[in-house]
Image (spheres, rainbow, N blue to C red):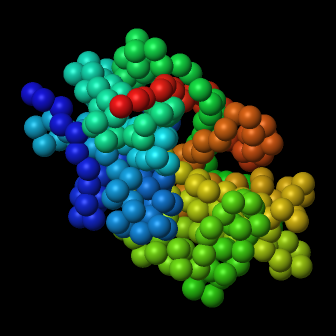
Amino acid sequence: MTVELGGSDGEGLREVLEALASWQVDDASLQFHPGDLGWFWRFGAEATAAAVRTWSRAGHLLAVGFLDSPTVLRLALAPQARDDDDLARALVEDVVDVGHGVLAEGRVSLEVPAGARVREALADRGWKGDEAWTSLRRSLADPVEDPGVRIEVVSADRVEERVAVQRASFDSSTFTVERWQTMHDAPAYRGARCLVAYDDRDAPVAAVTVWSAGPGRPGLLEPLGVHRDHRGRGFGRAISLGAAAALRELGSSCAQVCTPSANVGAVATYRSAGFALLSETRDISGDRSA
């Protein structure tokens, strides 16, 4: 049967979230998580739906693409579809052909799970490895050690602190209280928590959002940041531990995170919080023209 390219509307996003959650398994390489869509949802349901591409056969979702930007597509695959040759061919044709509307014209990149057949198929078309990403994972089978600082779950009276830490952690951040509320009210946030860490003077110093994919499945840290005025004091490790503990309370099997390999400081921080190196995967990129 034919593999069909599609999009998503507001109602269809629920099906996408459910599929992405069911595709999160402990013994597979990292791929994009329902929490990634949940974080993007701060821009609203319409923008989130516009950023989603789907590939289905006989009404069953096989792959979901998420446009993190007009030139970057993050791809998640159903576990049983990673070696599907027909799906790989369809994905490559839809990605390479500008007329199919999956990506913008010009140089583009794909985040593709390690070992997926589509990586080989793109390489056969001349696409090359690009930015390297490091995946890390911490088992939550055992209790998480005390982070050594006060960490609070963000409630309505702490939203401004959550937003302030985000903007002080990432120079290009456009996060606002209104965008936090939009994200909070979305269906993806039902299994999520925002956390803020405080120093011994009660100043907010670090923040994270954690996303559950359901009990017994991997959870995600996205994003995590330390206030620029409070770096180098162990708060990154502390909020990472707090994130792991929160995911354990939500029933996650493990806590996982992905960061650019070039960000050696972030990799070291996660490792100090008990996250083990899982893999390094490169995006795969190519030029597309009409």
- Using the rendered view, name the quadrant where residue 77 is placed: top left
Residue 189 seen in render: no
Which residue is more in the foreground, 39 or 110? 110
Query: Which residue is depicted at the point 33% across and 58% down?
Result: 49
Q: From the viewer's perspective, is 272 left or right of 56?
A: right
Query: Which residue is depicted at the point 59% across and 26% down?
Result: 130
Q: From the viewer's perspective, is 147 left or right of 24?
A: right
Residue 228 seen in render: yes
Q: Most extreme residue toward the front, as rendered?
A: 290
- Using the rendered view, name the quadrant where residue 93 is placed: top left
Which residue is more in the foreground, 263 or 143? 263
Query: Which residue is depicted at the point 69% across and 66% down?
Result: 166
Which residue is more in the foreground, 150 or 227? 227
Q: Most extreme residue toward the top, as rendered?
A: 124
Q: From the viewer's perspective, is 193 left or right of 169?
A: left
Q: In the rendered image, which quarter contains the C terminus?
A: top left
Point out residue 129 in the picture as x, y percentages from the top left corner: 56, 21
Point out residue 273 in the picture as x, y percentages from the top left corner: 74, 47
Q: How many marks?
A: 0
Point out residue 53 in the picture as x, y percentages from the top left corner: 31, 45
Say if 204 sits above or below 261 in the image. below
Say if 96 sits above or below 13 in the image. above
Say if 222 sits above or below 43 in the image. above
Q: In the rendered image, which quarter contains the N terminus?
A: top left
Say if 76 sits above or below 170 in the image. above
Point out residue 167 in the picture as x, y percentages from the top left corner: 71, 68
